[in-house]
Structures are given as structure tokens and as C-alpha cells.
Image (cartoon, rainbow, N blue to C red):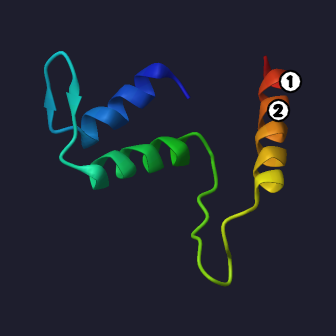
């Protein structure tokens, strides 16, 4: 994903610009982040009682796997 693609997504969600980028609230920030992640190919998982938040070790394993994949691409 290029910087230009990320900026285009941000412009679609931001509500104002000056020396900072302004968002209309937490929902707009979350929508922006979700769209960036989706465009980058990350799977979004909805958490519920039947699908709880993964534990620390599982999250660490996922992080390490993604880091390894990134290093292999470079």
C-alpha cells in the first residue's frame, strides 16, 4: 500500500485540515483505520463471546509471522 493510497483514504474520513488532521470523532478514526487495514489486506475479525480476543501468545505469534512475511518481501 502506498503513502498516496493511505492519504486518499484519510481525506475521505477527515473533517478538517490545518497543521493537524481532524476527525469528527472516535468513529471516524476507527473507520479510517479499518479502511486502511482492509486496503492493506488484513482480515478484520469481529470478536464475540464465541470468538473471544486472542491471548498474548497468539497475538505475538501473528505479529512475528507478519513481520517475517514483510522481511521476505523486502
Please determine whether, in this image, residue 45 is positioned above or below residue 23.
below
Q: Is residue 8 left or right of residue 14?
A: right
The C terminus: image quadrant:
top right
Q: Residues within 10 Å of mark 1 (few under 14, many from 20)?
A: few
Please give the count of numbered marks on the rendered protein. 2
Percent coordinates x, y for residue 62 in the rendering: 79, 47
Please determine whether, in this image, residue 32 is positioned above or below residue 1.
below
Percent coordinates x, y for residue 53 in the rendering: 66, 66
Q: Residue at x 64, y 55 (%)?
A: 43
Q: Quadrant of residue 64?
A: top right
Is there CB contact under 8 Å for labels 1 and 2? yes
Q: Quadrant of residue 17?
A: top left
**Front residue (pair 13, 51):** 51
**Can you identify the residue that label 1 sits on?**
72
Q: Residue at x 62, y 45 (%)?
A: 41
Q: Is residue 67 left or right of residue 12?
A: right
Q: Secondary structure at mark 2?
A: helix
The N terminus: image quadrant:
top right
**Can you identify the residue that label 2 sits on?**
69
Q: Residue at x 58, y 39 (%)?
A: 40
Q: Residues within 10 Å of mark 2 (few under 14, many from 20)?
A: few
**Front residue (pair 30, 70):** 30
State how far apart marks 1 and 2 are (Cα): 5 Å
Q: Which mark is residue 52?
A: none
Percent coordinates x, y for residue 32 in the rendering: 37, 44
Q: Secondary structure at mark 1?
A: helix
Residue at the bottom extreme, as displayed: 50
Amino acid at each position: 500500500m502506498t503513502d498516496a493510497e493511505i492519504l486518499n483514504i484519510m481525506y475521505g474520513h477527515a473533517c478538517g485540515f490545518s497543521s493537524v488532521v481532524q476527525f469528527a470523532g472516535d468513529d471516524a478514526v476507527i473507520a479510517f483505520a479499518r479502511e486502511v487495514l482492509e486496503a492493506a489486506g488484513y482480515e478484520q475479525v469481529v470478536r464475540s463471546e464465541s470468538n473471544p480476543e486472542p491471548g498474548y501468545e497468539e497475538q505475538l505469534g501473528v505479529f512475528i509471522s507478519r513481520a517475517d512475511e514483510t522481511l521476505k518481501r523486502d
